[in-house]
Image (spheres, helix red, strand yellow):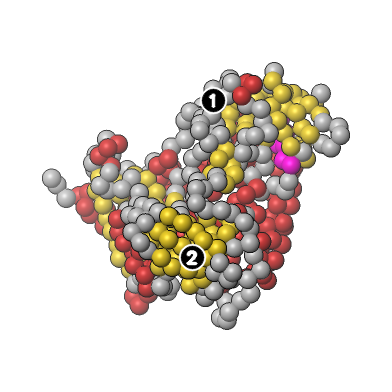
Amino acid sequence: MEEFDIVVIGGGTAGVAAAQSAVEQGARVGLVESNRLGGHSLFKGQLPLQILHDRVRKSDERVSLESLIHEVDEQAGQTSKAIEERLRNSGVECIQGEGALAGNRQVLVGQGDSPTLLKAGKIIIATGSLPQPMDKIPFDDQSIFHIDRLLDWKDAPASLLIVSGDKSGLEAAHLFNLLGTRVFLVDDNHRLIHERDPDLITALESGFKQQKIKTLLGKKIISIFKDTDKIDITLDGGVKFSTERVLVSGKRSGNTGQLDLNSLNIEQGAHQEIWVNENMETSLKDVFAAGSVTGRSRSLQISQEEGRVAGINAAGGNESIDPDQISFCLKTQPEIASIGCLSGDAHYKGYRAVQGRYDFSGDDGSNSHGEGFCKIIADRESKRLIGAQILGAQASEMMAVVQTSLREGATVKKLTQISETTPFAKLIISAAQECLRALSVRR
């Protein structure tokens, strides 16, 4: 029986991050994956949507969805091979097959008719998630699809209803609008990204309105009726319309059916999500979990951070998840990024928030891709950076710079001294300078 310090089950975003961080701590790591490395985010989720979005925006003429999807699949395959090569070069042993817990710190890997057992000092479960069935929405993979099936499409429909204003739903709405589809978006919340900064929310809703993306907020689906060539939709409040297709995002269940968790008394929620603490530990000693299998937001950034923390802790470290250090980025028009505290909510976490804001526009030389703003939030007492919100082109790239400073515990003054190696660095510095001025005002 082959023995490892750590066995990771699942080679998606969280599993790859866990294996990489564990091997960097000196552990002997085995990574079990039944398909291609990279998982949902690489082949069906956030990354394909971003690639499709970038390709469409850079094209001067109407492009074929089928050709774009073929290009995305090829790129995802190449990326998967690069991930495997990187892991192997770092010392991770990649093992093909479906993994299951076998008790006594063992993992059973099914490989055809000859399953094998692996001995593990610690185990990390990173098996991802699956779409939850939804009431009143009968998936048929002909005209009513879950968003996981988006890359099976060969053309863009003339009209489309997207159900759920989560990250994937919003980015899909923007993508199909660019492809010339008439897009409807329904969500039972009364505002888009309602937990984010109010100015970001207002800008996003205004942008969707200008793009003629019909957002139907605070609404629930009452019925869906399929006719020969259209789908009739009825929402509460008597709202009725027809579309060619329906694309559903939203809630998911933990992909744990093959793991046999009940026999080991690993605690789960109502939707098969694995419960973990801030160190990514499950209720069973020496077993960790990370990524969307934990039932948290299905986000590339969150999965990467959870995998990193789980890998470090399984290798003997002691780190915890800090949601305020994980960025949220939305590839829409306008592009949005956010991290840490909002100025209005910081007092709940013991901070006295001070904000600096810099507004920019394409005609002032600061940003060639349009207007937007950068907000920097600091704690008055420590002068430390505690949050940021950015609206505008390259928002996610700008946020990566801010995120590094926030994770380092940098002061706002230090943020004003970052290198101006990129055009958008000046925007961050300008917002930080405004925040520094606000901190200097005596109260």
Check the picture and name the quadrant holding the N terminus: top right
Quarter where residue 124 is shown: top right
Q: How many marks?
A: 2
Q: Point out which mark residue 267 bears.
A: 1
> In the picture shown, does residue 241 fall above or below 113?
below
Whether residue 233 appears in this view of the structure is yes
Q: Which residue lies furthest to the right in this view?
A: 113
> In the picture shown, does residue 354 fall above or below 214?
above
Q: Element under label 2?
A: strand
- Whether residue 150 sits left or right of residue 235 in the image: it is right
Q: Element under label 1?
A: loop
The 10 Å Cα crowd at callout 2, few under 14, some 14 to 19, many 20 or more, is some
Q: Name the residue under label 2.
A: 232
Is residue 420 part of the magenta span, yes or no?
no
Q: Is the magenta stretch mostly helix, strand or loop?
A: strand
* Residue name at image x 58 percent, y 79 percent: 62
Q: Which of 435 and 114 is in front in this view?
A: 114
The 10 Å Cα crowd at callout 1, few under 14, some 14 to 19, many 20 or more, is some
Q: Point out which mark residue 42 bears.
A: none
Label 1 vs 2, first from the N-terminus = 2
How far is the residue under mark 1 from the one under mark 2?
A: 41 Å
- Whether residue 355 sits left or right of residue 256 in the image: it is left
Position of residue 257 measured from the top left corner of the image (x, y, whole percent): 65, 34
Position of residue 133 measured from the top left corner of the image (x, y, whole percent): 55, 46
> In the picture shown, does residue 309 fall above or below 385?
above
Residues in magenta, as a range: 28-34
* Residue name at image x 48 percent, y 68 percent: 242
